[in-house]
Image (cartoon, rainbow, N blue to C red):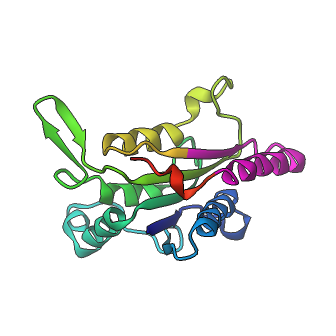
Amino acid sequence: MKLLHLDSSIQREASASRALSAAVVERLRSDDAGLDVTYRDLAGEPLAHLTLDAFAGAEAQATLTEFLASDIVVIGAGLYNFTIPSQLKAWIDRILVAGQTFRYGETGPEGLVKGKRVIVALARGGLYGEGSPFASYEHAETLLRGTFGFIGVEPEFIVAEGLNYGADRRKAAIEAAMTKIGQVHLQQRAA
């Protein structure tokens, strides 16, 4: 089984999303020590932003092939200015390819990616969850849910939020996310 692990935070060791995504991968490895993991640091080695040449280039094809070959994708993402990091957006631009991951038919778009599992470890400094006063400003989870849904995958989210509301709040949010990660298992893979 192949797992693609992506991190997109610019915060390196201080990143909650990196810590959470690493914990997800380790949790899945505990179910299968032979799990084939490929790691990409999209902030450390960013893809170029999309241009016509970049879209048709070898790097774009390699990125798409790597995604399609993976059974599980684990993504570490922070909420930056109400949405995902631009480095993650550049990666998404490589995997949304008509005829490869989706197509348009007589009834509209159809996702072509079936049976893949996507787990997103999302870190938010503020409180943007459902029912919060700033929920309408949250465009990371909604973007990723829509993007992966468009290609046929229902992503799973592990969210730690309120991380910038003091050390106690940060610790509690990360512990709650780690508890949720402890409940993640390989057999939960989407059909």
The reply to whether residue 155 is in sight is yes
> Viewed as shown, does residue 52 lie left or right of 76?
left
> Viewed as shown, does residue 104 lie left or right of 165?
left
Q: Is residue 112 magenta?
A: no
Instruction: Determine the residue located farthest toward the right in the rendered image.
Output: 168
> Viewed as shown, does residue 149 lie left or right of 12?
left
Compared with residue 28, is residue 81 higher up or lower down, i.e. above or below? Answer: above
Q: Residue at x 53, y 73 (%)?
A: 44
Compared with residue 137, is residue 55 higher up or lower down, i.e. above or below? Answer: below
User: Front-most of 191 and 126?
Assistant: 191
Q: Residue at x 52, y 41 (%)?
A: 141
User: Front-most of 16 and 25?
Assistant: 25
Compared with residue 190, is residue 105 higher up or lower down, i.e. above or below? Answer: above
The spot of residue 139 in percent (x, y) is 51, 38
Say how many tags the image has.
0
User: Front-most of 145 and 52?
Assistant: 145
The spot of residue 143 in percent (x, y) is 45, 40
User: Front-most of 164 and 188?
Assistant: 188
The spot of residue 166 in percent (x, y) is 86, 46
Q: Quadrant of the N terminus?
A: bottom left
Span of residues in magenta: 157-183
Q: Residue at x 21, y 55 (%)?
A: 100
Q: Kindly indicate the quadrant of the structure image that contains residue 25.
A: bottom right
The reply to whether residue 87 is in sight is no
The spot of residue 9 in percent (x, y) is 59, 61
Q: Residue at x 58, y 75 (%)?
A: 33
Q: Is residue 161 magenta?
A: yes
Instruction: Determine the residue located farthest toward the left in the rendered image.
Output: 106
> Viewed as shown, does residue 1 lie left or right of 105?
right
